[in-house]
Image (cartoon, rainbow, N blue to C red):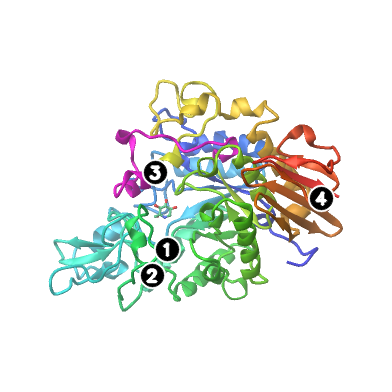
């Protein structure tokens, strides 16, 4: 993007991901709700983020906690009502916050009226809305395709004697996007929320949308690692990232653009960079932000992260705006992956790299994965093996040191047990402590807002040693230097790094001139203005 050109809010801004079940319960049922989100909007404004993305709150039997939808255009009573959603949206907008909702086009619940109709008979007018196939002559599934949650991706339907395809849970049959009626119905879902005033969508499971028409078997994955989901024993080349998906995305984009140029489409994509960047579409007519999940999966060291950033920067087309995701509801939390100390430098990294950052709720207070006793495990991904369950990253937000951490009333049982550190690690305590990770996030967000070099400036790599990562961000005449210790040993700083400390993980350093002999300890980071 050339200097001076107008940047959209989703390019300058920071996105905060909320898992509504776990954010704030207002009706005492132990499950977070939309009113709860509305109640906490002032916190998000205080923190300094620009937009919130809400994981699904639509009617659902909750086999996959809301990613199995029975009505894409309504609110599950567990979360409230459409009126509650409108109130949330209105209040967010009043406070200057944008609202992004989850859009789940790949599948519905098996209890969705469309699927109920589709499975009722082979002659049903909605039969072809889903992916139905005959068995092989021996009665086995049509091919070797696997479900992300384990086992075959084909489920036998006794009554109509065919298999249906489900990329995820058997209660999440995949829609057939080759069918124009499906496309129209699902574009209609986008229109419904756009008319209500949402600022954009996070499009779920985007790479899964189209499957190979010839139903070819997926090849084995030679790099499969023991302990990983059985889904990874194959390379999903015929079930994901098919070329036809891009036409569908253009269709979605046309719907979106029909409601003004200011709405954003984020595509949930786990792909290597050469495949990922194709989702920007020709001349940027695809998704605005194909999610870059590589901070979640790359080994946490200065050399590998430096290489990651360079590879990404090199792969981006001129019209492709970068983005970075540090964590989400499907993966272990950053504080668990790298430890609470290093999570501080990770905050600085996320908010000073070039590209739109997405933060996951609770990471700003350094929440780590909860330890969930077996009887409280819920997530279907954990059915295959408990360690694959995603519940630990979804424990309730820790607001205060009161019982149940202010998430739900003290006499209520939260849907997932609170993390044991909530008495110490919570918003109320950390708000008052300038050394807390929450205060660090808030200072970072404020700095990012006031420094175009950080939000829209260019990126220049400076140095990567075993522990140190240093780079510059520049906009117009302003050049800022960022140094982070991402390793395990103290490190000295490059001599070229000189100037005034604008931000430090040690707040007492801020405002001072950087001393040439300064060393950074593991987890420490600085932003310096020469
Ligand atoms: C990705 C979502 O983030 C995840 O939580 C869900 O299980 C699958 N898509 C299926 O919708």
Distance, label 1 to label 2, CA atoms, is 9 Å
Where disc 1 sits, the SS reads helix
- Residue 378 colored in magenta in the image: yes
Residue carrying label 1: 186
In the picture of the structure, the residue carrying the numbered disc 2 is 177
Counting residues from the start of the chain, the first of labels 1 and 3 encountered is: 3
In 3D space, how far apart are the residues under numbered discs 4 and 3 (Cα atoms)? Answer: 53 Å
Q: Say which element carries label 3.
A: loop
Q: Is residue 178 visible?
A: yes
Q: Select label 3 or label 2 by which is in front.
A: 2
Q: Nearer the viewer, mark 4 or mark 3?
A: 4
In this figure, which residue is indicated by the disc labeled 4?
A: 497
Q: CA distance from mark 1 to mark 3?
A: 19 Å
| In this view, 136 is above or below 332 | below
Quadrant in which the N terminus appears: bottom right
Q: Is residue 302 magenta?
A: no
Does the CB distance between marks 1 and 2 fall below 8 Å? yes
Give the residue pinned by disc 3: 76
| Mark toward the start of the polypeptide (4 vs 1) | 1
Residue furthest to the bottom = 214
Q: Which residues are magenta?
A: 361-388
- Asked if 190 appears above or below 14 in the picture, the reply is below
Q: Earlier in the sequence, mark 4 or mark 2?
A: 2
Q: Secondary structure at mark 4?
A: loop
x and y, in percent, of residue 78 in the image: 39, 38
Residue 117 pos. (x, y %): 25, 61
In depth, the one of 434 and 132 nearer the eye is 434
Visible in this render: residue 97?
no
């Amino acid at each position: 993007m050339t200097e001076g050109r107008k940047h959209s809010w989703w390019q300058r801004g920071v996105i905060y991901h909320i898992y509504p079940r776990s954010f704030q319960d207002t009706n005492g049922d132990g499950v977070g709700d939309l009113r709860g989100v509305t109640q906490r909007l002032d916190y998000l404004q205080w923190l300094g983020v620009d937009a919130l993305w809400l994981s699904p709150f639509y009617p659902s039997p909750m086999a996959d906690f809301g990613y199995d939808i029975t009505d894409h255009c309504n609110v599950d009573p567990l979360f409230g009502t459409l009126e509650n959603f409108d109130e949330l949206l209105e209040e967010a907008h009043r406070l200057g916050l944008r609202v992004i909702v989850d859009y789940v086009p790949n599948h519905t619940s098996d209890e969705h009226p469309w699927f109920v109709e589709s499975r009722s008979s082979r002659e049903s007018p909605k039969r072809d809305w889903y992916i139905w196939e005959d068995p092989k002559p021996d009665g086995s599934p049509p091919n070797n395709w696997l479900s992300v949650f384990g086992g075959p991706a084909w489920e036998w339907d006794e009554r109509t004697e065919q298999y249906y395809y489900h990329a995820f849970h058997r209660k999440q049959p995949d829609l057939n996007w080759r069918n124009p009626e499906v496309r129209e119905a699902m574009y209609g879902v986008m229109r419904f929320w756009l008319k209500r005033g949402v600022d954009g969508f996070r499009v779920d499971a985007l790479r899964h949308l189209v499957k190979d028409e010839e139903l070819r078997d997926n090849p084995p994955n030679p790099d499969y690692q023991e302990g990983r989901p059985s889904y990874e024993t194959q390379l999903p080349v015929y079930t994901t990232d098919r070329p036809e998906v891009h036409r569908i995305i253009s269709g979605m984009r046309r719907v979106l653009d029909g409601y003004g140029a200011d709405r954003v489409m984020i595509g949930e994509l786990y792909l290597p960079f050469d495949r990922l960047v194709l989702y920007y579409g020709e001349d940027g007519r695809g998704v605005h932000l194909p999610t870059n999940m590589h901070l979640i999966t790359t080994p946490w060291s200065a050399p590998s992260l430096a290489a990651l950033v360079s590879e990404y920067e090199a792969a981006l087309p001129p019209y492709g705006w970068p983005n970075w995701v540090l964590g989400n509801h499907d993966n272990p939390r950053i504080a668990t992956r790298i430890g609470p100390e290093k999570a501080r430098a990770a905050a600085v990294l996320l908010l000073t790299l070039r590209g739109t950052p997405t933060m996951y709720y609770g990471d700003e207070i350094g929440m780590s994965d909860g330890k969930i006793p077996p009887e409280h495990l819920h997530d279907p991904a954990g059915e295959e093996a408990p360690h694959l369950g995603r519940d630990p990253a979804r424990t309730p937000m820790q607001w205060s040191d009161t019982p149940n951490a202010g998430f739900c009333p003290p006499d209520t049982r939260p849907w997932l047990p609170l993390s044991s550190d909530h008495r110490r690690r919570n918003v109320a305590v950390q708000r008052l402590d300038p050394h807390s990770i929450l205060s660090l996030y808030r200072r970072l967000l404020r700095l990012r807002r006031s420094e175009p070099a950080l939000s829209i400036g260019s990126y220049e790599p400076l140095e990567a040693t075993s522990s140190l990562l240093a780079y510059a961000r520049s906009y117009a005449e302003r050049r800022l230097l960022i140094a982070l210790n991402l390793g395990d040993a103290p490190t000295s700083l490059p001599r070229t790094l000189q100037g005034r400390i604008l931000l430090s993980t040690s707040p007492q350093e801020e405002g001072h001139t950087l001393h040439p002999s300064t060393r950074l300890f593991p987890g420490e980071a600085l932003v310096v203005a020469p």
